[in-house]
Amino acid sequence: MRRMLLLILGWIGMSACAFGQAAAADTHTLQALLSEVRALRQDLRVSLNRAQSMQILLVRFQVQEGAVTRAADRLSDARQKLLDAQIHQKELGLEQKRLEDSPPATDPAEQSDLLDKINHVKADLEVTGRAAQQRQAAEIQAEQRLREEQDKLDALENQLEELAGSMDNSNDKPSANRP
């Protein structure tokens, strides 16, 4: 009987030791799983923040592309208006030269009419010259605005590239909290 009692006590003792060891291993496993879940959660937060930043930058990039396009259109319009003014100015200059080189009129009325035409062309030429100067100033301003808008677009593009690079780098290396 003693033998049976010792055998039962031995079996209970070994079961208790085995149960205690299993609990320690389970606790260690649970701690490792909890650590992994926390690391994954942190990685998810970082990824979501980067994705939101990327979306915001993409919208800003699209808006800035529109601003660059509008600035390029304004520059194109300013150049066309300047070209038109310069062509008109050359035409008036040729008209003035033609009138001045025409043979002198014998009739005083024709002579007076010719002088009136020359004076009128000179006045138009002066007005057109001032308009061409204004158009040239507008073209310079449009060029400057286009450069400014393009610089902003380039800065946004660099930010996008940096963010995309940081996203690629974070995807390549595992989290420090993970086993």
Image (spheres, rainbow, N blue to C red):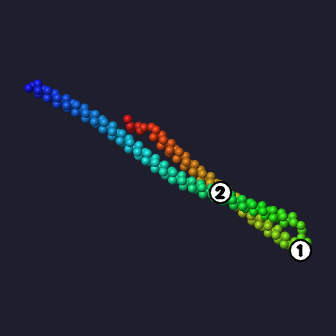
Quarter location, residue 143: bottom right
Q: Say which residue appears at 54% left-offset and 53% top-offset.
A: 62
- Tag 1, which secondary structure? helix
Q: Residues within 10 Å of mark 1 (few under 14, many from 20)?
A: few
Mark 2 — residue?
75
**Left or right of 22 on screen, residue 171:** right
Residue 161 x %, y % = 53, 45
Q: Residues within 10 Å of mark 2 (few under 14, many from 20)?
A: many
Quarter of the rendering occupied by the N terminus: top left
> Which residue is at the far bottom?
109
Residue 137 showing in the rendered view? no
Quarter of the rendering occupied by the C terminus: top left
> Which residue is at the far right?
106
- Tag 2, which secondary structure? helix
Q: Say which residue appears at 20% left-offset and 32% top-offset.
A: 16
Residue 20 x %, y % = 23, 33
Q: Say which residue appears at 51% left-offset and 51% top-offset.
A: 58
Tell me how far mark 1 sits from mark 2, CA to CA. 49 Å
Residue 28 showing in the rendered view? yes
Quarter location, residue 127: bottom right
The answer to whether the residues at label 1 and label 2 have Cβ atoms under 8 Å apart is no
**Mark sitting earlier along the chain (1/2):** 2
- The disc at residue 26 is none
Instruction: Identify residue type, mark 2.
Output: Leu
Instruction: Identify residue type, mark 1.
Output: Pro
Foreground pick, 34 / 95? 95
